[in-house]
Image: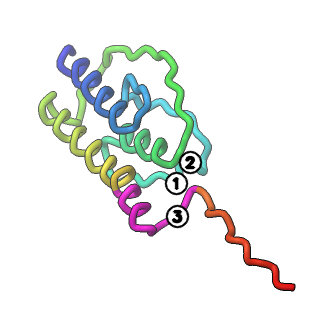
């Protein structure tokens, strides 16, 4: 429906801003990746893993490429994720906490000099004594 379509655009814009990458849909769950990458991402949400996986993978340095896909209208059943307002609020909460954990948290740790480093510091050469 139009409200969910608008929500997809809003959250895609927010995700693009916080990741510095162009993202058109954070909720589409079709992903292709190596097993190692999938295992390296922290997933804590039982229902909203698509955005959590996307933001976590990008925070881990994954390459990202969107391909056009067609989503068809549901032919049977109903969503278990709530009405548009509930779904949007929960989805926003997951995106916010994932960003805080994966981006803001890592940046804070880097600033404090804690955690893994992506590059090694150059070795300091000792003067040669003769």
Mark 3 or mark 2, whichever is nearer to me:
3
Residues marked 1 and 3 touching at CB (< 8 Å): no
Observer-nearest residue: 46 or 112? 112
Q: Is residue 16 above or below residue 113?
A: above
CA gap, disc 1 and disc 2: 5 Å
**Mark 3 element type:** loop
Q: Residue 123 colored magenta?
A: no
The image quadrant of residue 70 is: top left
User: Which residue sits at x=50%, y=24%?
Assistant: 66
Instruction: Give the side of residue 89 with respect to residue 69, left or right.
Output: left
Instruction: Give the side of residue 62 with respect to residue 1, left or right.
Output: right
Start and end of the magenta stretch? 105-118
For the N terminus, which image quadrant?
A: top left
Q: Position of residue 124 (x, y in %)?
A: 68, 71
Q: Is residue 56 above or below residue 29?
A: below
The image quadrant of residue 89 is: top left
Instruction: Decide which of tag 3 and tag 2 comes sooner along the chain.
Output: 2
For the C terminus, which image quadrant?
A: bottom right
Instruction: Decide which of tag 1 and tag 3 comes sooner along the chain.
Output: 1
User: Which residue sits at x=43%, y=39%?
Assistant: 54
Residue 116: which disc?
A: 3
Residue 37: which disc?
A: 2
* Within-10-Å neighbours for mark 2: few <14, some 14–19, many 20+: some
Circle 1 sits on which residue? 40
């Amino acid at each position: 429906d139009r409200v969910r379509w608008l929500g997809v655009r809003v959250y895609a814009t927010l995700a693009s801003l916080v990741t510095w990458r162009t993202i058109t849909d954070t909720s589409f769950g079709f992903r292709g990746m190596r097993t190692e990458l999938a295992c390296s991402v922290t997933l804590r949400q039982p229902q909203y893993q698509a955005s959590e996986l996307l933001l976590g993978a990008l925070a881990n340095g994954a390459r990202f490429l969107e391909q056009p896909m067609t989503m068809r209208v549901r032919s049977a059943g109903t969503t278990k994720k709530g009405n548009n307002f509930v779904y949007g609020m929960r989805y926003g909460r997951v995106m916010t906490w994932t960003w805080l954990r994966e981006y803001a948290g890592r940046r804070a740790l880097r600033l404090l000099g804690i955690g893994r480093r992506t590059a090694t510091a150059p070795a300091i050469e000792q003067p040669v004594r003769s």
